[in-house]
Image (spheres, helix red, strand yellow):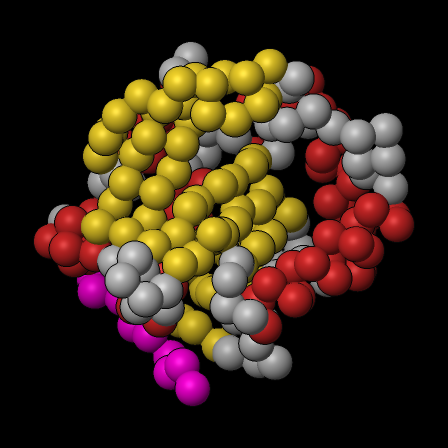
């Protein structure tokens, strides 16, 4: 099996990577999502915008789903949950957002992982899988990601996936109520094709199923 099998259904892509499944969130995912986010609260909140009082409520989740579906239809952003291959165990999530077309052909990558699943290489495989989607399916030229300088896990993840550090952004995002500096990383389509995408973990070139209309 290649690195990625892609299935398009109603503008909601499903990505099958090595030992993982990426698909858009559904209403039935609420309890798994709420439980994983709640138990990982102390692990996640130092790296995320401040949580609202109703952050984990069912109405808030429904609003998220509505926004995710709209963004995917418009091809402006794709949010995925990361599961085991059978789609039963939720590991975390990631978003390929702020997609720009035209002369830019770029996007911004964000991600989160439940604490109990961290350190197992799951997010590394998820990032590599979504990068194939970005470059091979969406036809993008550049994927950016930013992380707080003290977030060693995130730095290690990005660099292991072939991202290159480009700069230091002053007070870039408000994280946990504080304007935080961030490190800017990027991965170009050329970088991906030459190294990380096709040779990571000694896997073969990706197998892509489906084409964009």
Q: Residue furthest toward the bottom?
A: 213
Q: For the N terminus, which image quadrant?
A: bottom left
120 over 26 or under it: above or below: above
User: Is there any visible trace of residue 151 in the rendered image?
Assistant: no
**Residue span colored magenta:** 200-213
The residue drawn where x is 52% and y is 26% is 173
43 over 126 or under it: above or below: above
The residue drawn where x is 51% and y is 78% is 8
Q: Between 59 and 23, which is closer to the camera in this rendering?
A: 59
211 over 61 or under it: above or below: below
Taking the image as shown, residue 198 lies to the left or right of residue 14, namely left
Q: Residue furthest toward the front?
A: 103
Q: Is residue 210 magenta?
A: yes
- Mark count: 0
Q: Residue furthest toward the left?
A: 194
The residue drawn where x is 26% and y is 25% is 167
28 over 93 or under it: above or below: below
x%, y% of residue 71?
60, 63
Taking the image as shown, residue 74 lies to the left or right of residue 17, namely right
Give the image quarter of residue 193: bottom left
x%, y% of residue 91?
59, 43
**Secondary structure mostly taken by the magenta-highlighted segment of the chain:** loop
The residue drawn where x is 47% and y is 52% is 98
Taking the image as shown, residue 111 lies to the left or right of residue 169, namely right
x%, y% of residue 111?
51, 40
Q: For the C terminus, which image quadrant?
A: bottom left
Q: Is residue 129 magenta?
A: no
x%, y% of residue 86?
60, 62
User: Is there any visible trace of residue 63 in the rendered image?
Assistant: yes
């Amino acid at each position: 099996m290649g690195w990625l099998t892609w299935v398009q259904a109603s503008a909601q892509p499903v990505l099958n990577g090595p030992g993982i499944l990426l698909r858009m969130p559904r209403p039935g995912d609420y309890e798994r999502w709420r439980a994983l986010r709640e138990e990982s609260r102390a692990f996640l909140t130092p790296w995320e915008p401040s949580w609202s009082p109703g952050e984990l409520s069912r109405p808030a989740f429904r609003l998220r789903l509505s926004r995710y579906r709209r963004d995917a239809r418009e091809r402006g952003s794709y949010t995925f949950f990361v599961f085991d291959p059978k789609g039963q165990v939720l590991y975390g999530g990631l978003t390929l957002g702020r997609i720009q077309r035209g002369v830019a052909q770029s996007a911004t990558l964000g991600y989160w992982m439940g604490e109990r699943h961290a350190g197992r290489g799951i997010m590394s495989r998820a990032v590599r899988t979504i990068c194939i989607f970005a470059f091979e399916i969406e036809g993008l030229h550049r994927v950016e990601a930013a992380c707080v300088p003290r977030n060693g896990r995130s730095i290690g993840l990005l660099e292991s996936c072939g991202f290159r550090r480009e700069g230091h952004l002053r007070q870039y995002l408000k994280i946990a109520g504080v304007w935080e500096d961030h490190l800017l990383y990027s991965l170009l389509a050329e970088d991906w094709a030459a190294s990380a995408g096709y040779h990571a973990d000694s896997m073969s070139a990706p197998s892509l199923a489906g084409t964009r209309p």
